[in-house]
Amino acid sequence: MNLPEPSSIHRVGVIGTGTIGASWAAYFLARGMEVQAWDPAPDAEAALRAFVDGAWPTLEGLDAVADGASPDRLTFHAGPAAAVDGVGFVQESAPENLDVKRTLYAEFDTALPDGVVMSSSTSGLIMSELQAGFSNAARFVVGHPFNPPHLIPLVEVVGGTGTDASVVDWTIDFYNAHGKKAIRLNHEAPGHLVNRLQVALWREAMDAVLTGLASVEDVDDAIKYGPGLRLSVMGPFELCHLAGGPGGFSNFLDHFGDALQQWMNDMRTVELTPEVRAKLKSDVAEAVGGREYASIARERDTLLLPVLSTLARTRREHGLH
Ligand SMILES: NC(=O)c1ccc[n+]([C@@H]2O[C@H](COP(=O)([O-])OP(=O)(O)OC[C@H]3O[C@@H](n4cnc5c(N)ncnc54)[C@H](O)[C@@H]3O)[C@@H](O)[C@H]2O)c1
């Protein structure tokens, strides 16, 4: 398949500009790209421009705005075909609904310029089903970001059965060339990889509350004052390798394998019955107390931004990936 050099792409289409699409637009603009956007909501252009203006100071604070980059490089278009005209890459962030996305893909199928990859932000839909029957299906791929994509580097890339293998490689190279951290999934799975990892944690968090092992506050504190700190700098396998001492992961498994097996055998699936949902909702509401949503979001950003900035700078200075 004839695809351009990933780093040569300077104009992208952003389709759907809600929570995720607006964040992608801010990200690509901060990288110095031209962004051609479309979203059918009546107030979408104003909301998108307001989001980008709001995100810009944060991106500048993180030293993440390229020389010459500007929110003025954002144009808003009358429909998907106009928004993908002349672009080198498309990021689709339409609602998480198979029919809505397939209706959109029918438009891309005729409008997408030659050699242009269309990457979907879908959190859980299967690309093989999204792309089925389209003549340009080979250029459709999943590039699932972690919210919010203008701040969090990760993108999971996975192709469907109809995606050309070179498109998966190209998409990973594209994201990495433009400052993201892309990982490859070797096959499709509901929830991709990251949401499955998160759900494993959430399942145990919910189970701990439901069995009375710990309160909502203590479960949250357990993660944020413990494993969460290490998990922001190393992955589970690296951490297990360190836990094994100088003998590394092999020693870890030899010493802790039987205990791990016993703990895994003790874990159970949480059934989200109406009663279970009601109990969790009430416990979380009590733990959150009267704190406003906006104030919790501010607290997250106040703490997260220095972490992101310090990690990016320290990785650069020490040549760590
Ligand atoms: N919210 C998250 O945390 C998150 C994280 C990663 C990925 N995603 C994925 O990103 C995608 C978008 O999710 P979101 O959270 O931004 O949803 P959202 O509801 O905030 O935004 C969806 C946007 O799509 C627009 N839209 C409606 N019909 C459309 C159409 N036919 N074509 C194009 N756009 C249309 C809506 O006007 C809206 O602005 C989904 O596939 C979702 O799974 C979401």
Image: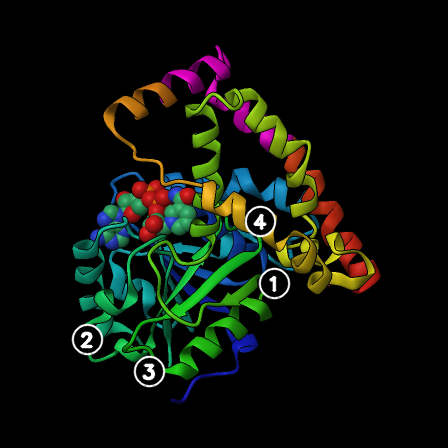
Q: Tell me, yes or no, if residue 16 can be seen here.
A: no
Label disc, if present, on residue 260 of the rendered structure: 4
User: Cβ of disc 1 within 8 Å of ligand 1?
Assistant: no
Q: Which residue is mark 3?
A: 114
Q: Amino acid at mark 3?
A: Asp
Q: Nearer the viewer, residue 5 or 123?
A: 123
Residue at disc 4, secondary structure: helix
The answer to whether residue 38 is above or below residue 303 is: below
From the viewer's perspective, tell me whether residue 73 is left or right of residue 16. right
Q: Position of residue 213 (x, y in %)?
A: 51, 24
Q: In terms of sequence position, does the residue under pointer 1 or pointer 4 come before the other?
A: 1
Which of these two is toward me, 285 or 139? Answer: 285
Instruction: Say if 79 sits above or below 44 in the image.
Output: below
Q: CA distance from mark 4 to mark 2?
A: 46 Å
Quadrant containing the N terminus is bottom left
Q: Amino acid under label 1?
A: Gly
Reading the image, the residue beneath label 2 is 134
Gap in Å between the C-alphas at discs 1 and 4?
Answer: 37 Å
Q: Give the residue at mark 1.
A: 179
Which corner quadrant of the image does residue 157 belong to?
Answer: bottom left
Label 3 CA crowd tier, 10 Å (few <14, some 14–19, many 20+): few
- Judged left or right of residue 240, residue 43 is left
Q: Is mark 4 within 8 Å of ligand 1?
A: no
